[in-house]
Image (cartoon, rainbow, N blue to C red):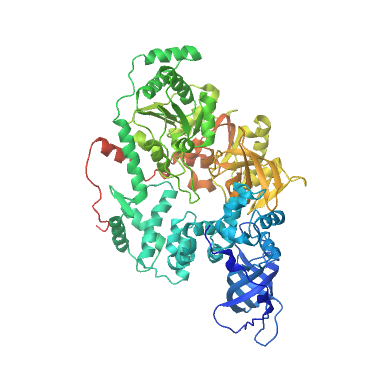
Amino acid sequence: MDGGPATAFLLCESKFAGIRENDFKRKGESILICQFKRLIYPKAVTAGDASYMIALYRPCEKVMDAAGNVVSEIKAVGYCLPTADNLRYDMRGRWSRSAKHGIQFEVEGFDEVIVPSKEGVIAYLCSGQIKGIGPKTAEKIYAMFGQNTLTVLDHEPEQLLAVSGISKTKLKKICDSYLASRGARDVVAFLAPHGVTPNRAVKLYKQYGDHTMDIVRNHPYRLCEMVGIGFKTADRIAVSMGFDPLSPERVDEGLIFTLTDAELKGHLCMEKHSFLKQCLKLLDTEGLTEEMLAVRASRMLESGRLASYDRQVYRAVTARTEQSLAWAVYRMLTYEKAGSHVNIDTEISAEEKKQGIQLASEQRHAVTTALTSQLSVITGGPGTGKTLIQRFLLDIYRRKNRGAKIICCAPTGRAARRMEQATGFPATTIHKALGLLAGEDGDYCEPEMLDADLIVVDEVSMMDIYLANHLFRSVPHGSQLVLIGDADQLPSVGPGAVLSEIIACGAVPVVRLDRIFRQSYGSRIAANAKLIRHGNLSLEYGEDFQFYDSCDMSASAQQIETLYLQETARYGFDNVALLTPYRQKTETGVNALNERLREKLNPQDGKKPEVAYRKRIYRLGDKVMQIKNCEDISNGDIGYITSVTRDDTDSVLTVDFGDGRIAEYDGSDLEMLDLAYASTIHKSQGSEYKSVIINLQCAHAVMLVRPLVYTAITRAKERVLIVGERRALCIAIKRTDTEQRGTMLSARIKELISNVKGDHYNGNLAQ
């Protein structure tokens, strides 16, 4: 572990026998040894809190005011102040006088003063500073390691696994919080006033170690490299320390952040002039011109931090990824054909007889194309037979190629399980198939080569450029890849429009399914999906497709509540989805609806245990969603809290996700969970439900586009209930331009196919 040796914090009792006098008139930094007495503001400190604090402390040494009077208590102010009442603190800071509050000590940092005795070490261990260690565990640790306990924590924390009750999961929690309580603490306190959460500050410390404070103070724009710390936050820190607004470091990071921010909105690149104008707006600095930005951008192109293609500007890593994927697609297109059409019709006919189903001509064409192409795409809306085609394809391939290896996968765990249920073939996530594991920094390791002769990928529209690149690069030479998805759905949450761009390149065999065959899907649902896809407002309404007019947010929330209770009683909780564009801001946002419905469906009766984390409460019986990939639990998986227990120090939640997948959460792990009575439309991709309730309001105008409403209604198999304003529905159906993403993947593939050589970049954005 990083951090200084714990022995540096050990002080002998004799130190407290001496008296050090501090004078309120003293200039510069002061040091104060004291003990926590009580908290003034806020009234309570919750997990992950980084708010401004006011507390009273009792001096452990003689402190006198300017008049020579001994002071019995000191008012301290600052962020992340220590509140354990069984420890002493060596606090660093400055004295100040407030006109309203009088003399106070502005805390800039602190260390625990740990008495080198059994009592002192145990007091520190179970002070609450180290999550996962309570009184019982502290006693066990000291019994095993004695006075070497803190040395073990510093240098060999894995030895704690020998202590009864400490698992690998708990050890990670102990190490993380110990790190935060030591070296990261000053970073946490320094960044808290700027809106950086303690979790992000600790991650920052893990990334940069003992150099973190130097970076924060002297190179604050490097903080933009970390997800969750934007340019504006880094800029506020830099300005507070006197950075020149026209410094090259600030301008360069502004250019990079402009592209990073665009990627968060789905774009891989920006047109040159739009890029410069957007950056100029971000920097908002007097004397800075577009021409000056262009010169800096050109230098960054020369240094390799930026890249350019056909007047589009990229971050270098993004450009490399897009080009790598283009090459991988081109490579597959140059393979020899996978097979001939000989006997394919016969095989399809045999499979039709076996399943008692006759395929339409376009469905037969889709199966034939997939079986005879190295790379192929099958795209279509609900009810067009994509799942049926998958079954035919897989059964025929397995029968024709005995012993061949087949991989079925999808971008999310829910989509993979739906694929498995529909086809009867084992399916997994793309991440799992590739062996992609995310590190603490969010970056993935290098993927493994796929050991398969046939790879079938469903819900391809959800794949971003980075995942797609990993997938294509991992396809062995000669293996077949079949991509299946609905190109009219919302594009991926991550950057790029992979499915649409592969289709648009015109070189990959594509079968478009447009006829609706599966009437059981819901005649009006599938029919209306087709109408929406073509921008037609003449939707059909009936029992399976209804609209409830409501322009008032409160009235809409009440109507949604009524319908949700009605539909869950009819179909069951797991078969009903409540979808809305926004997470926050309105009464019909996800957060507000989750709280509202939870109090109806799982109210507190005085007996149900619950856990508070930040601003959210998790209660026994709650329906929850995983929002980060973790081991065999995937982003988007839904489960139920089956137990809330308390161990030595923390509350532990147990969540049952079905299929024998049970996971435990405690401490900061809770950030991976969200309530799931309602969810965003984006989060619903890859899922299907018997009934779907959708909220559409004009207040959501910025989000209202055709792929959004199309994706929402195609989640339903039997019923769609829309609550809101008809005008909002019309706006969404008519608007498509907002989803046009900055990407040149199709152009790059075309260039490779046509064998066009040369660099589209002339090396100078200033021209």
Q: Quadrant of residue 334?
A: top left
Q: Is residue 521 left or right of 291 when viewed as pictured?
A: right
Vertical side of 712 occupied by 518: above or below: above
Relative depth, front residue between 522 and 727: 522
Q: How many marks?
A: 0
Q: Percent position (x, y) of residue 500?
A: 38, 36
Relative depth, front residue between 149 and 361: 149
Relative depth, front residue between 652 and 275: 652
Q: Percent position (x, y) of residue 719?
A: 58, 30
Q: Quadrant of residue 504?
A: top left
Q: Percent position (x, y) of residue 64?
A: 67, 83
Q: Residue at x 68, y 59 (%)?
A: 126
Q: Determine if residue 37 is in view.
A: yes
Vertical side of 466 occupied by 30: above or below: below
Q: Is residue 267 left or right of 51 when viewed as pictured?
A: left
Q: Residue at x 51, y 41 (%)?
A: 682
Q: Percent position (x, y) of residue 70?
A: 70, 83
Q: Determine if residue 743 is in view.
A: no
Outermost residue, right side: 606
Task: Identify the image quadrant of the C terminus.
Answer: bottom left
Vertical side of 450 occupied by 764: above or below: below
